[in-house]
Amino acid sequence: MRLLCFIMTLCFIASCEGQKKSENKALEERISRIENGLQSNLRVQYGDSVNIQYFNIEDRLKELNIPGVSIAVMNNGVVEWARGYGMADTSQNKKVTTKTLFQAGSVSKPIAATRALQLVEEGQLNLDSNVNDYLRSWKVSENEFTVKEKVTLRRLLNHSAGLTVHGFPGYSIKDTIPSIIDVLDGKGNTDPVRVFRAPGEKVGYSGGGYTVMQLMVSDLEQKEFSDIMQKNVLNPLGMTSSTYENPLPKAYHSIAAAGYKSDGSQVAGKWHTYPEMAAAGLWTTPSQLLLWAKTIQDTYQNQKDGFLKTQTVNEMLKDYGNNQGMGPYVVEDLFGHGGSDEGFVSDLRIWKAYPISVAIMVNSDNGNDIIQELFLSIAKEYNLPGIYHRLRKYNEQSKAQRARYVGAYQFSEDAIAKVKIKDNGLEFSEGLVKNPIFLLPETDTLFFSSKSGLYFEFVFENDLVTNLKVAGYNGQKMQE
């Protein structure tokens, strides 16, 4: 009998090992398809055909002049796989691993918002009270815009507080790091944070607002913001290798990636320091970001209280306008946040109806292209909605037709761009861009960048081109 039990146990173990090997093989094949299935975000249709190119991730890093990238995918509550590619620091020949720390940029915001929302749940903060009721060491300046409406925590978190300062460039190794109050008063390297339109009027992205939130939380708890986040959010979630502390403590330097500019040069001092911690100061890994993603996703999908209460998460993931929630952006199929610090780009995307979330972090200003290509490849492999290519249609124009657009366009007093004919399209140079952009025609008035798909719209009046509009800028054609 004992022999029979022993044989059955061996068979069971062998069966489990066989199943595990089969699952590991399937996962490796899945990862390989993602690694070798990168597609350009821009698809150009010529006639009835669309040319689709596929790239290998290592080759793509070289083509885009990107040192390294780190990826993590969570599926059904566990990190299914995580990989590092390329170099964390070329000067030290240090490779990217799954433990390499990257600067998260604005992905810092939704994680930072978590502490503020905890304090709301504890009754120490109110989402809709005047933030000046809680601020002690500094106050939001009252003006004509705050007579009827006030800056509130809800409005800080969903970017509708009417505050200035979109983002922060950080401070180099040569700079003196200002206090958070000096930052808010414009004594750092950005403008002062002030109310410039009625709070609640509309959503307008403001890193300045998150810096006000940072000070409000610190004033309330009488502690450093980084310590508050470590004790109450990062450590409890298991994000024990992550930190909001700026400058980055030396204990982390050996596992931190160096940032790189678009020309491939390393950021002086390897990275910038961000005293604006809530807005841009988090150091972390993709796998650690997914620990935060999991707790928010679980509560949203199951409608059961977790790290935050269900009501809080539902409020967090409400669209307050322009796809903006209280921390994350919120669109039809997913929520998340992107981020960029000097030399770093990152993106966190969490699906609403699927138990999947993905975080990607890159140590280069050139990171946006490969991040989107990776998301396209991952979405295809996992059959996920909400990630789409950018499609443009090429319609041939004669040289005589394109000659109408040639000339100089004045976008501002010191920004004059030039347009000339090149090959089967146009070349846009100077003024608004460092490097020339090659444009292809889609309609009689609409051209697009052959690399990004960005539209350039020419405005006609009496059959003559008078203006050129691009990315919110309007340039007037100059008389020859």
Image: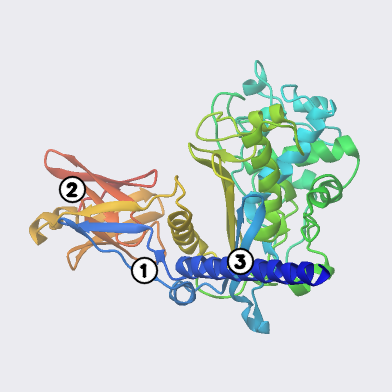
Q: In this view, does 478 lie above or below 24?
A: above
- Distance between the alpha carbons at the discs numbered 1 and 3: 32 Å
Give the residue at the far front of this rendering.
Answer: 1
Q: Is mark 2 on a helix, strand or loop?
A: loop
Amino acid type at circle 2 is Thr
Q: How many marks overall?
A: 3
| CA distance separating discs 2 and 3 | 56 Å
Q: Residues within 10 Å of mark 3 (few under 14, many from 20)?
A: few
Residue carrying label 1:
54
* Of pointers 2 and 3, the one earlier in the residue sequence: 3
Q: In which quarter of the image is residue 286?
A: bottom right
Residue 33: x and y, percent?
45, 67
- Which-is-in-front pick, marks 1 and 3? 3
The residue at which mark 2 appears reads as 443
Which amino acid lies under the numbered mark 3 shown in the image of this protein? Gln
Q: What element carries label 1?
A: strand
Q: Distance between the residues labelled 2 and 1?
A: 28 Å
Q: Which dot marks residue 19?
A: 3
Dot 2 or dot 1: first in sequence order is 1
**Quadrant containing the N terminus in the rendered view:** bottom right
How busy is the neighbourhood of tag 1: few (under 14 within 10 Å), some, or many (20 plus)? Answer: few
Nearest to viewer (mark 2 / mark 3): 3
Using residue 454 as the reference point, say whether residue 287 is left or right of it. right
- Would residue 26 be found to the left or right of residue 128 on screen? left
Taking the image as shown, residue 181 lies to the left or right of residue 95, namely right
Name the residue: 61% across, 48% down: 167
